[in-house]
Image (cartoon, coloured by chain):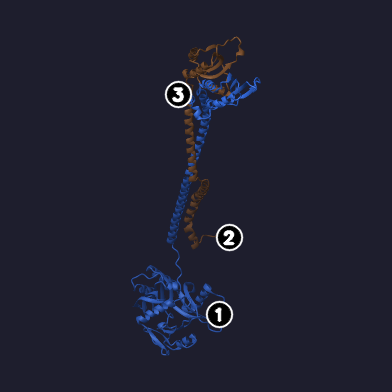
């Protein structure tokens, strides 16, 4: 069988002439076009994905408005907390056990000034008061450094004198609160002899 | 063939005694000779040299559609039995005609080119062909000569039988050596008869007449210098005046058609190595450019998409940032609110305790001021809900009056006065005296105004003056 040799026909020559261009095209396709097409496809998918999850100006504006409202709310809360703290600070500054003795001495002085006898003076750990007031006392106790103290006084005096005493006590003694006041029934202690118009009183003080 | 007629053509005519070059163009629906130059030809000058002389008659390069009309190439009529060429056509028929004309043209069939056109057949079974042939070498030389002058040789034909005088479609031609009679049918095959003249007898004329198959046309050409045949009775126009020659060139160029006239078409020249290399280089450069353009375009597209993604991403990033800020603010606000609730409770407690510290003084005063003279307050007793006031009254409406009187004034101090409980002792006619119990229930401060009440303000409210 004869081996077919190249006859350099025009067709063969034209094929050879266009071979370099074909090689260039193949190299371009293999090393550039395929990778580039892949990148483009990926980028197009990313673009579609980004478009589908696009954010409108309205959404941004709404979010901005929400954040603005939240900031306003935060500022309002901070101001309220500051104001409340200031109120608390000013309210509790005068309380505490440090000067309790001197305040108590002034209580005694005022009782004497109004001809009110103190039959019993006792430090107590809790006061007989309404639940609401006891809860408030418990909160105040936490706020005051060292806690607050309670005194229970059993007094004998006339109604009008006691009324004046109850007016002067908070007005003149800073850091003292009459937390509870009740009368002592006479039958509880038959030995006690009250004077003319006098009544027995039980006073709870927070100081 | 309007396409070719519309182009400018160069017509080179090589006669036995003269050569001419005409520049022809298609204008106004017909061929027009723009320029015609003629010169004499010496009988010893070879055909190719004569053609070169013709080219040189006009300074400009011959056109890319140059036609060479030569008198001294062989052209003749060939009758063949139909059976001998039955079924042949194209290249096979041409090859057969080459062999058949070999004895008349004395040209080697293997080294010659032939153009042929079939004429009207001769009944009953003879086909007639009009053939023109020339040696390969001559054709190549003629093509090379025209190409070297910047033109391209596209057609070669014999000068005989191209056109009649004044555009007539039937005519005779008499040159010094040839005689011919022709009818150019617009429909059907043309008729032609060509024979070689002889000075010894008139047999050539009878042969011409016989071969033509009828009466010879009454008009015809008589080549310049040729002897008028005495046996021909028609009118002969001498091929001499420039106007006549120009008309002949125009008509001949117009009628020159391989389908109606034997024309030798030079083979297309082979593509040179230089051409291949040039095409290869150009194709490579073009491909490189295309690839570069494709690469640049792809990069540009990528950049455009990336830019669009980036632009679309900006609002998304901004949204993410704002959402994060929003979350942070909400978290802060929640903690602040918890703190506020806690500190608000503490504040309420402090305000509750510190405001109205003299409220027992107020209570004792209100009781004293508002009690009926027949009502006696016996005791005040602390209770888990607040304070219980007990006493006795001669009148049963006095406790209610007392409760009504003090209720509104004690509310700012955190006491809500309940309806008194009244019980009669049945010691009097109206079932009195009456024991009563009045409960003051502790309530939280009602609003900010109540929180901010100081003892001074409260006293002012109660007593009408600031104490």
| Mark carried by residue B466 | 3
Residue B149 in picture, x, y percent from top left: 37, 69
Marks 1 & 3, CB-CB < 8 Å contact: no
In this view, B343 is above or below A58: above
Residue B238 in the image, given as x and y percentages of width and height: 37, 84
**Residue that carries the numbered disc 1 in the rendered image:** B82
Who comes first in sequence, dot 1 or dot 3?
Answer: 1
> Could you say which quadrant of the image residue B47 lies in?
bottom left
Q: Secondary structure at mark 3?
A: loop
Secondary structure under tag 1 reads helix
The chain holding disc 2 is A
Q: 10 Å neighbourhood of mark 2: few (<14), some, or many (≥20)?
A: few
Label 1 with label 2: CB-CB less than 8 Å? no
Q: Nearer the viewer, mark 2 or mark 3?
A: 3
User: Which class describes the residues within 10 Å of circle 1: few (<14), some (14-19), or many (20+)?
Assistant: some
The chain letter corresponding to brown is: A
**Disc number for residue A1:** 2
Is residue B127 visible in the rendered structure shown here?
A: yes
């Amino acid at each position: 069988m004869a081996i077919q040799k190249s006859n350099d026909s025009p067709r063969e020559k034209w094929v050879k002439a266009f071979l370099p261009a074909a090689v260039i095209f193949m190299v371009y396709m293999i090393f550039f076009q395929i990778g580039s097409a892949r990148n483009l496809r990926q980028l197009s998918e990313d673009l579609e994905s980004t478009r589908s999850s696009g954010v409108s100006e309205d959404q941004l504006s709404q979010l901005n408005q929400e954040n603005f409202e939240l900031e306003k709310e935060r500022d309002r809360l901070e101001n309220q907390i500051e104001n409340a703290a200031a109120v608390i600070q000013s309210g509790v500054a005068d309380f505490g056990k440090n000067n309790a003795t001197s305040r108590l001495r002034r209580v005694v002085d005022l009782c004497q000034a109004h001809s009110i006898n103190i039959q019993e003076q006792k430090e107590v750990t809790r006061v007989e008061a309404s639940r609401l007031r006891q809860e408030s006392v418990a909160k105040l106790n936490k706020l005051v450094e060292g806690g607050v103290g309670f005194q229970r006084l059993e007094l004998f005096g006339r109604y009008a004198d006691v009324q004046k005493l109850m007016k002067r006590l908070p007005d003149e003694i800073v850091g003292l609160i009459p937390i509870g006041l009740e009368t002592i029934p006479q039958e509880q202690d038959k030995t006690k002899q009250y004077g003319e118009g006098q009544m027995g009183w039980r006073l709870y003080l927070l100081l | 063939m309007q396409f070719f007629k519309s182009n400018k053509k160069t017509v080179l005519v090589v006669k036995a005694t003269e050569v001419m070059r005409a520049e022809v163009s298609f204008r106004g629906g017909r061929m027009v000779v723009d320029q015609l130059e003629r010169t004499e030809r010496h009988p010893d000058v070879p055909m190719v040299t004569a053609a070169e002389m013709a080219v040189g008659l006009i300074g400009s390069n011959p056109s890319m559609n140059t036609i060479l009309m030569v008198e001294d190439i062989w052209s003749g009529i060939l009758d063949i039995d139909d059976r001998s060429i039955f079924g042949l056509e194209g290249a096979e028929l041409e090859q057969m005609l080459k062999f058949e004309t070999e004895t008349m043209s004395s040209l080697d069939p293997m080294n010659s080119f032939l153009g042929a056109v079939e004429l009207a057949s001769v009944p009953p079974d003879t086909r007639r062909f009009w053939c023109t042939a020339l040696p390969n070498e001559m054709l190549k030389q003629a093509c090379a000569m025209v190409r070297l002058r910047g033109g391209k040789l596209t057609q070669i034909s014999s000068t005989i039988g191209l056109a009649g005088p004044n555009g007539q479609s039937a005519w005779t031609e008499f040159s010094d050596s040839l005689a011919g009679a022709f009818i150019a049918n617009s429909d059907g095959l043309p008729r032609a008869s060509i024979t070689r003249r002889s000075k010894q007898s008139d047999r050539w004329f009878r042969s011409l007449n016989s071969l033509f198959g009828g009466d010879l046309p009454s008009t015809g050409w008589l080549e310049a210098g040729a002897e008028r045949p005495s046996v021909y009775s028609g009118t002969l126009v001498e091929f001499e005046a420039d106007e006549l020659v120009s008309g002949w060139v125009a008509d001949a160029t117009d009628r020159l058609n391989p389908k109606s006239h034997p024309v030798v078409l030079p083979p297309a020249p082979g593509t040179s190595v230089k051409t291949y290399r040039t095409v290869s280089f150009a194709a490579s450069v073009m491909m490189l450019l295309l690839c570069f353009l494709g690469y640049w375009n792809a990069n540009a597209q990528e950049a455009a998409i990336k830019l669009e993604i980036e632009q679309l991403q900006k609002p998304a990033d901004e949204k993410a940032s704002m959402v994060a800020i929003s979350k942070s603010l909400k978290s802060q606000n929640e903690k602040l609110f918890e703190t506020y609730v806690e500190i608000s409770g503490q504040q309420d407690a402090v305000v509750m305790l510190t405001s109205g510290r003299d409220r027992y003084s107020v209570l004792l005063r209100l009781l004293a001021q508002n009690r009926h003279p027949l009502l006696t307050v016996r005791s005040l007793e602390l209770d888990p809900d607040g304070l219980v006031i007990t006493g006795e009254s001669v009148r049963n409406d006095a406790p209610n009056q007392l409760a009504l009187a003090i209720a509104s004034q004690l509310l700012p101090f955190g006491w809500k006065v309940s309806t008194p409980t009244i019980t009669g002792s049945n010691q009097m006619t109206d079932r009195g005296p009456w024991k009563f119990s009045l409960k003051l229930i502790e309530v939280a401060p009602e609003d900010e105004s109540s929180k901010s009440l100081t003892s001074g303000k409260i006293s002012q409210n109660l007593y009408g003056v600031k104490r």
